[in-house]
Structure formats: structure tokens, C-alpha cells
Amino acid sequence: MSVHATRFRLAAAAAFAVLAAPLAPSPADACTTAIVAPSASRSGRPMLWKNRDADGSDNQVVYLADGRYPYVGVVNRGDAAGLQVWAGINSTGFGVMNSASYNLESGDTAGEGTFMKLALQSCATVDDFEALLARSNSGGRDVSANFGVIDAKGGAAVFETSAKGYVRVDAAPSGDGARGLLVRSNYSHSGTKGSGSGFLREARAIELLGSSTAGGLDLATILRAARDVGNAGIGQTGEESGPPLVYTGDSICRLDTVAAIVLEAPAPGEGPEAGALWIVPSLPLAGAAVPVFPHAGAVPAPLAAGRGPAPLAARALELRKRLFPDTRGEKKRYMDRRALAALKARSLPGLLAAEEATRAEVEAAREAWRRSRPAPADAAKLSASAAARALAAGEAAVAAVAKELGEP
């Protein structure tokens, strides 16, 4: 056995020990997610979406080659070692993300980032992930989650997972609101009925995405949902006139949203280099999504992990402060309606234009990659170009809002 394989087996054994051991409680996460089968995807690529809601204000991205497969993953600010990964995709096109579940019989959310790291290190398919769950059932996991998983073979499933059990639901032919689409928030459909949280966010996501599956979901449609501040319970969209504050505590895009992430596995005919992680590293309304490719072997500097906010997140955080100016008590969950209108009118068009330019550039590159596999440097250059474009758009967005509303 090679030294690399031996080290990986030791690391995997250590990870299982950590998962089975009682860990210190971690901050409760509350995310909105979707699993998209090839049948519901315009490109034919399986996709995962996660609006990550967590403590803090922003996330970062790492590239790691510390397992069987190299991968890129979303981490908390400063976690350059990637000790906990909250969504990611590896060099085979295997992708995983989670939403915490609060209605399963057992389990906690403390070990989910560790478990997803192990999955990225070791899994190439949805079935591999299920085997990983099966092996860890007997020892138990500090996990209570809906894990979304995709692979380059067209696999797309959710695993509603507790400490010593799981229920697998494949996205095709099943669907929430439409064939090939599964949406989950912070409860499991196999768990205790009526318990958990995120019912309004899940219903809103099904409303926004379900009607689009007939023509095929794409990146733009998913990111539009990621930026939604609607609230189905009170009939709010954020577009209407009304009081000066907009309540977003039950919205998909809200104060707690620290990143919007879309993972794309390769489509039929594409190599693993087509797999990508797209991310807005802070509030989705306040930034343009940037792709990161495991094949590149690197993360562009404006997204990379460090002690302070990544540059792309820093620009978004300036806009976030405009939208949520009052940090006192529950007032922190109310968005300033005037700032929201200014952002949508003056800043969002430029951010979306940058995002669309990047999407077109990536699709053109993927088409070329079908004919000739790119060098890692080519994929890295594409990602760096996208990050530079998003950074410029973010700076322009901050300036546009300042011009409309005055300096903060």
C-alpha cells in the first residue's frame, strides 16, 4: 500500500472517531437547498444549490488534496485547512452539501462539516456516499442533516441522515413540486411530522424553482431564487411599497445567509474538469457568483481563505450593512426598504451582468474542453478572470448605492 493511501486510511479512521465522539456544540445552521437531477437541468448537469445560513457574515473557499480525490470546498472564514467543509465538489465531479435537520430522532449538527470533508476526500459517486453512511451507522455520527449529493454519472439524491440511520430519496423520478427537483430546508420529510423549521423557505423555493423545471433549471434561475427576499406567509415580495422595513427572517435571502452556492457535476460527454463550485461568498443579493474548478488546483485570491473577509465578500459586506443597518435585537432581521430598492435598481444589474458574462465564458470554455482537456492553468485562469470581473462589479455596486443614498 502506498504512503499516500496509508495516510488517507488513517485520516479516514480519525474522522470516523471524531464523528462518533461527542463534540462541542456548533452554532445551529438553517439553510435552504435543492437537488436537481439531469432531467430537470437545462444543461443536463446534476446540480446542488445551498443558501448557507449560519453565524458570521461570509464564507471562503479552499482547494485541498488531502484525500483520495482533490476538491474545492466552502469553509468558515479563516479555516484555510478546511477542517469543516460546508459544500464542495471533487476532481471526479462528486458534489455534496447539507442543510441541518431538526426533526430527526437522534443526532446533532456538530459533525456535518467533518463528514462532508471525508465524503469529498473519498467518494466518486452517490452510491459511494451511501456506502460511507452505511459504514458509519453502527458507530454513529454527530449528524442531523439533509445531505444533497450529485455525481458525474447523473446521480442526484438527498440523504435524510441521523446519528445511526438515513433515508435516501433520489431526485429522479421523485420531485418536490416538479419532476427531478428536491427542495429541503431544516426538517426531513422522513422525520417527525410538524417539527423542524424552514417551512416557509422551502415552500418559497419550490414556488420559484418548480415552475422552471419544464424548460430546465439553470444557474441564473437558481441564483435568482437565492436572492429572493419574499415571504409567503405575509404575502411579501420586497418589490411592493410599504413600511420602511422589510421582514426577512423567513426569507430565502436574509441576514443569516453567509453564502449562495451552486455545484455543477459534469454532463454526459463532459470530462470531470467541467465540474464547478459557484459561490457568492456573502449575502447573495450583494455579489456576483464566481466559479471555482477542482481541476484548476487553486482558488482565486478574491475568494481564498484568510483571517479577514475575502475581497469579494468584503464588497458584499458593505452592501449588507446598507440593507441591515440596525443590529439591535430582532431589528437586525429587518431589511431597509429604501436600501433594497436602491440596490436592485442601481447595483444588482451590474452584478448580474458580470455573472452572465462569466457564465457565457465558462460555457464556451466547457464546449472547447469537450474537444481537448484543458491544462489546470487554463481552468485557474478562467476562475481568476471571473473573480476579477465580480470584484470590479462589486466595487461599482458599492459606489452606485453610495451615490443613490449618500455615504453611510
Image (cartoon, helix red, strand yellow):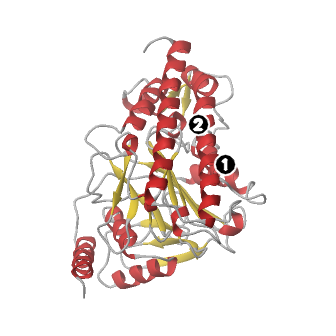
Return the residue nearer the eye: 328 or 315: 315
Quarter in which the C terminus is drawn:
top left
Return the x and y of residue 184 as percentages of the image width and height.
55, 60
As helix, strand or loop, the secondary structure at mark 2 comes to helix
In the current view of this chain or complex, which residue is farthest to the bottom?
1
In this rendering, is residue 372 above or below 125? above
Looking at the figure, which quarter contains the N terminus?
Answer: bottom left
Q: CA distance from mark 2 to mark 1?
A: 15 Å
> Label 1 near label 2: C-beta < 8 Å?
no
Q: Disc 2 marks which amino acid?
A: Ala
Q: Secondary structure at mark 1?
A: helix
Residue 30: image location, x then y, percent: 44, 52
Q: Quadrant of residue 104?
A: bottom left
> Which residue carries the number 1 mark?
221
Relative placement, left or right, of 233 versus 215 is left
Q: Hey, what amino acid is under mark 1?
A: Thr
Between 123 and 296, the residue placed more toward the observer is 296
Name the residue beneath numbered marker 2. Answer: 354
Residue drawn at the location 71% of the way across and 59% of the way down: 42
Q: Is residue 87 visible?
A: yes
Determine the residue positioned at 51% across, 49% down.
382
